C-alpha cells in the first residue's frame, strides 16, 4: 500500500508559508526579467520554525493556474534535499518554463493561484496491464506513474477531479506517455503514490474583493490524500 508523504499533514502555518514562498519566488523571478512585476503583491506569512519537515527531503510538484487555465506544473518524482528549496525551484519552473504553456505575466498575477503537492514514495503495483491496473487503483486517492521502459508519465491525485473514471484516467495517462491503450495496454506497469496537496483559492475575475484576499494569502484550499 502506498504511504503518505508524512505521518501527519503539515500544519496550516507551514502550508501558508510554503505557498507564500512559492509566490514570492515566482514574483522575484518575473521581476528579474520584467520591471512591471517588481511591485506584484505576495502577501505576508511567517515561517513556522518548529516544523523540521520544512528542511526535510521531499518529492514536490508545483502548479499555477490562471483561474482554472493551466499556467504550468513541474516537479520531481525523486526527493529534493530540502522541501523549501524544492518549492522555490519548481514554483519558478512551473510559472515560467513549462514548455506546454505560455509563461506567467504580470497582467495575470491577480488571477493566478498556486498549488503544491508533496508526494509519498511511489510503490510498484504487482499487477500488469491496463484493465488490471484500472481495477487496482483507487480513484481520488492514488497518483499514478505508468509506462513501459523509459516511456513513462505521471498524473497527480488532483487529476481525478477532471478524470474520475479509472479507465479514462489511465487512457489519458497512456496518451501522455506516448503509448496506445490498445497496443501497449496489456504490457504497461504502474506505480502509485499518495500526496498532500494544498493551494490558494481560485479567484473569479468578476469579484475584485476576492482577488485582493487571494493576493494576501488569507485562505487555503487543502486536499490531504492518505
Image (cartoon, helix red, strand yellow):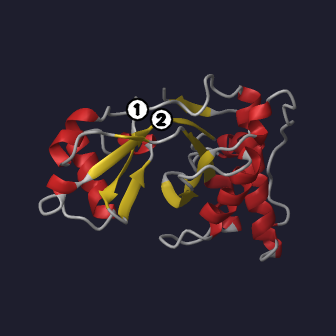
Judge depth for marks 1 and 2 and give the one in front: 2
The label number, if any, that marks residue 194 in the structure image: 2
Q: Quadrant of residue 110?
A: bottom right
Nearest the camera: 106 or 5? 5
**Dot 1 or dot 2, earlier in sequence:** 1
Q: Are the residues tagged 1 and 2 within 8 Å (C-beta)?
A: yes
Residue 33, image x, y percentages: 78, 77
Q: Residue at coordinates 64% horizontally, 65% vertically from top-left? A: 93
Residue under circle 1? 141
Q: Residue at coordinates 43% horizontally, 40% vertically from top-left? A: 157
| Position of residue 76 in the picture relative to residue 210 (left or right) | left
Nearest the camera: 211 or 38? 38
- Residue 206 versus residue 140 in the image, above or below: below
Residue 156, image x, y percentages: 45, 46
Q: Is residue 212 visible?
A: no
Residue 35, image x, y percentages: 83, 74
| Position of residue 174 in the picture relative to residue 143 (left or right) | left
Regarding mark 1 in the picture, which secondary structure is present there? loop
Residue 65, image x, y percentages: 55, 54
Regarding mark 2 in the picture, which secondary structure is present there? loop
| Position of residue 14 in the picture relative to residue 61 (left or right) | right
Nearest the camera: 12 or 213? 12
Q: Alpha carbon of mark 1 to alpha carbon of mark 2: how far?
A: 7 Å
Amino acid at each position: 500500500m502506498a504511504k503518505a508523504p508524512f505521518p501527519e499533514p503539515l500544519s496550516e502555518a507551514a502550508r501558508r508559508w510554503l505557498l507564500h514562498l512559492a509566490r514570492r519566488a515566482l514574483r522575484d523571478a518575473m521581476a528579474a526579467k520584467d520591471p512591471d512585476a517588481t511591485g506584484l503583491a505576495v502577501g505576508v506569512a511567517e515561517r513556522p520554525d518548529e516544523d523540521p519537515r520544512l528542511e526535510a527531503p521531499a518529492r514536490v510538484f508545483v502548479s499555477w493556474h490562471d483561474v482554472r487555465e493551466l499556467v504550468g506544473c513541474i516537479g520531481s518524482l525523486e526527493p529534493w534535499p530540502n522541501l523549501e528549496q524544492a518549492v522555490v525551484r519548481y514554483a519558478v519552473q512551473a510559472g515560467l518554463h513549462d514548455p506546454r504553456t505560455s509563461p506567467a505575466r504580470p497582467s495575470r498575477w491577480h488571477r493566478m493561484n498556486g498549488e503544491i503537492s508533496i508526494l509519498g514514495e511511489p510503490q510498484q503495483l504487482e499487477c500488469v496491464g491496463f484493465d488490471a491496473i484500472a481495477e487496482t487503483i483507487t480513484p481520488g486517492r492514488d497518483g499514478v506513474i505508468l509506462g513501459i521502459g523509459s516511456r513513462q508519465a505521471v498524473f497527480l491525485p488532483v487529476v481525478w477531479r477532471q478524470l474520475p473514471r479509472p479507465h479514462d484516467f489511465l487512457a489519458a495517462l497512456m496518451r501522455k506517455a506516448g503509448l496506445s491503450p490498445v497496443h501497449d495496454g496489456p504490457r504497461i506497469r504502474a506505480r502509485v503514490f499518495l500526496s498532500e496537496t494544498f493551494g490558494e483559492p481560485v479567484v473569479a475575475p468578476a469579484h475584485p474583493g476576492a482577488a485582493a484576499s487571494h493576493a494576501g494569502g488569507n485562505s487555503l484550499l487543502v486536499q490531504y490524500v492518505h
